[in-house]
Image (tube, rainbow, N blue to C red):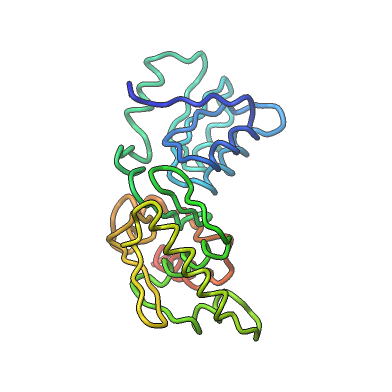
């Protein structure tokens, strides 16, 4: 991988900060580190970025079973050599597509995240991100203010004005990166256009291998209303 960009971290906390800021194709982790084991770090990375390939580099064979239970991509015994590393890079669990980071990409499996050209998309309001998550959850359906209010808030307050602000924030933010065609609006309603974005959830529903392989039993974990769809996904997995 001659064009690869390498990021070296001094410890687990710094690694997690990097993962929160950018999508990584591969993470090389030592198993034994101060403060947090490599296995614990791998679990946290997978929650944020399920598609990141985890390759453990260690001198301790006894951790191999636990490492692979996390769907790790590889396990390299020390001392490391170029040959060992290249062998793992040729057999990644999640193949690297250089175009995957281009454009609008939505991650629904694990925590819900939104990226544009590989960088997290920042909204003015945190609730705007949840609004987009709900539109993704609803797939191609156009939803109205009443449905949004009933799902995102569990109270009787009038949220119409605030929802309009969220809708504007969503449209303005997407327009700022040239992705405003990913959302369709009509009088009183809003929805997403799946073909205008990359999304693991949509790939899963379409039966795409990359979408199916991305699902590890977690869906939009930070939103309680997503449990309905999560239950449907689990049922499909167990059929």
The one nearer the camera, 109 or 140, is 140
Q: Residue furthest right?
A: 35
Residue 181 sits in quarter: bottom left
Q: Above or below — where is 69 with respect to 160?
A: above
Residue found at x 64% / y 28%: 11
Hey, which quadrant is residue 40 in on the image?
A: top right
Q: Is residue 174 left or right of residue 181?
A: right
Up-down relation of residue 188 to residue 221 (above or below): below
Q: Residue at x 66, y 82 (%)?
A: 155
Total marks shown come to 0
Residue 175 on image: x %, y %: 38, 58
In the displayed structure, 98 sits above or below 188; it is above
Q: Nearer the viewer, residue 94 or 138?
A: 138
Residue 171 point in image, percent of width and height: 42, 64
In which quadrant is the C terminus drawn?
bottom left
What residue lies at 52% left-to-right and 64% top-to-bottom? 128
* Residue 4 falls left or right of residue 154: left
Above-or-below relation of 160 to 197: below
> In the picture, which quadrant includes the N terminus?
top left
| Coordinates of residue 10 in the picture (x, y in percent) | 63, 24
Q: Residue at x 41, y 36 (%)?
A: 25
- Where is residue 212, by image quadrant? bottom left
Estimate the x, y position of residue 129 in percent, counting from the top left.
51, 61
């Amino acid at each position: 991988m001659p064009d690869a960009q390498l990021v070296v971290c001094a410890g687990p906390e710094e690694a997690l900060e990097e993962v929160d800021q950018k999508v990584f194709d591969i993470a090389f982790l030592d198993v034994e580190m101060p403060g947090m084991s490599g296995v614990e770090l791998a679990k946290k990375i997978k929650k944020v970025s399920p598609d990141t390939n985890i390759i453990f580099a260690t001198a301790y064979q006894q951790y191999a079973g636990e490492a692979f239970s996390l769907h790790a991509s590889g396990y390299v015994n020390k001392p490391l050599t170029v040959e060992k590393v290249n062998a793992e890079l040729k057999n990644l669990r999640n193949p690297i597509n250089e175009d995957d980071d281009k454009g609008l990409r939505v991650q629904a499996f694990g925590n819900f995240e939104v990226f544009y050209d590989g960088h997290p998309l920042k909204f003015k309001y945190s609730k705007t991100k949840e609004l987009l998550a709900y539109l993704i959850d609803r797939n191609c359906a156009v939803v109205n203010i009443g449905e949004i209010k009933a799902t995102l808030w569990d109270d009787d307050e009038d949220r119409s004005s605030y929802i309009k602000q969220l809708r504007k924030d969503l449209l303005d933010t997407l327009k700022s990166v040239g992705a405003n065609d990913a959302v369709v609006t009509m009088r009183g309603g809003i929805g997403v256009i799946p073909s205008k974005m990359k999304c693991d959830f949509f790939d899963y529903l379409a039966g795409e291998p990359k979408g199916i392989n991305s699902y590890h039993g977690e869906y939009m974990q930070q939103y309680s209303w997503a449990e309905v769809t999560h239950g449907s996904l689990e049922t499909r997995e167990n059929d």
